[in-house]
Amino acid sequence: MDKPTNLHISEVPQDFWVWVNPSIWLVKHQITLTGSFTSAGSVGRGESNLPFIPNPEFTGDVSPFSIGVSHHYTAEYNFEINRKHYFPEYPSRLNAIYLLRSESEAMEYKERHMSHVDGRVLKKVHTVGQYAYSIHDSSWVDFLRLPHSCDEQTIHDVTHAYWQGVNVADCQLRSMGTPWTESPIIEILYLGRIDFYERKLLP
């Protein structure tokens, strides 16, 4: 099997776009005072970055209200387990900076994820020094976060396709018995430092 080509390691400067939340004090500090973000992880770090692991004594009894609390983390857990086993050289979703390749793709992401982007400001950035990033269709994440259940094989196939850089639109998926697809929304998982072109938080 050929090695996926959606992983890039370089020092050549590149531009990206990022949605930032100006109401978070750390974001405000980093943009207005230092003018940069640096990812939590380093290039080439392949260990698991899971902050929590499942309880082996869990019996399966859970309130429907509690499911909402853990559902998104369960998806992230499954992505991280697949990365650790098959793509350890890739940035982890749990310590990377999430970037977008262009302003137009950033606006597409906003249209699809309005509740997540609400109140955020779009900023243009450029890379500094050595960095690593991988390219993925975030629609796979949307699929695992749907209020449905997936068997282990489906979870494996979905998370594996995400890390390989496959687009959801090129596959056949079903949710609750009906066909499901989305146009690709490409996200960049970035490890390294980015500098902001402007230190103003608001346009």
Image: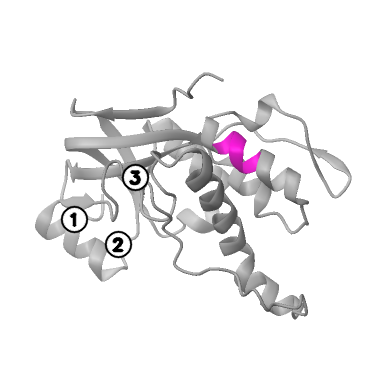
Asked whether, in this view, residue 18 is left or right of residue 53, the answer is left
Q: Main secondary structure of the magenta part?
A: helix
Residue 111 screen position, x and y as percent = 54, 44
Tell me the residue that label 2 is attached to.
Answer: 22
CA gap between label 2 and label 1 equals 9 Å
Q: Nearer the viewer, residue 43 or 138?
A: 43
Tell me the residue that label 3 is attached to.
Answer: 18
Which numbered disc flags the more N-terminal residue, 2 or 1? Answer: 2
Callout in the foreground (2, 3) = 3
CA gap between label 3 and label 1 equals 12 Å
Residue 53 screen position, x and y as percent = 54, 68
Name which residue lies at 56% across and 63% down. 73
Which numbered disc flags the more N-terminal residue, 3 or 1? Answer: 3
Q: Mark 1: which amino acid?
A: Ile
Callout 2–callout 1 Cβ contact below 8 Å: yes
Asked whether, in this view, residue 108 is left or right of residue 196, the answer is right
Callout 2–callout 3 Cβ contact below 8 Å: no
Number of residues whose C-alpha sits closer than 10 Å to that of mark 3, classed few (under 14), some (14–19) or many (20 or more): many
Above or below, 165 against 124 in this view is above
Name which residue lies at 42% across and 55% down. 94
Tell me the residue that label 1 is attached to.
Answer: 31
Quick one: which residue is furthest to the top in this view? 2
Q: Secondary structure at mark 1?
A: helix
Asked whether, in this view, residue 170 is left or right of residue 82, the answer is right
Q: Mark 2: which amino acid?
A: Pro
Number of residues whose C-alpha sits closer than 10 Å to that of mark 1, classed few (under 14), some (14–19) or many (20 or more): many
Q: Nearer the viewer, residue 132 or 37?
A: 132
Query: Which corner quadrant holds the N terminus?
Result: top right
Q: Nearer the viewer, residue 85 or 105?
A: 85
* Residue extent of the magenta highlight: 158-162
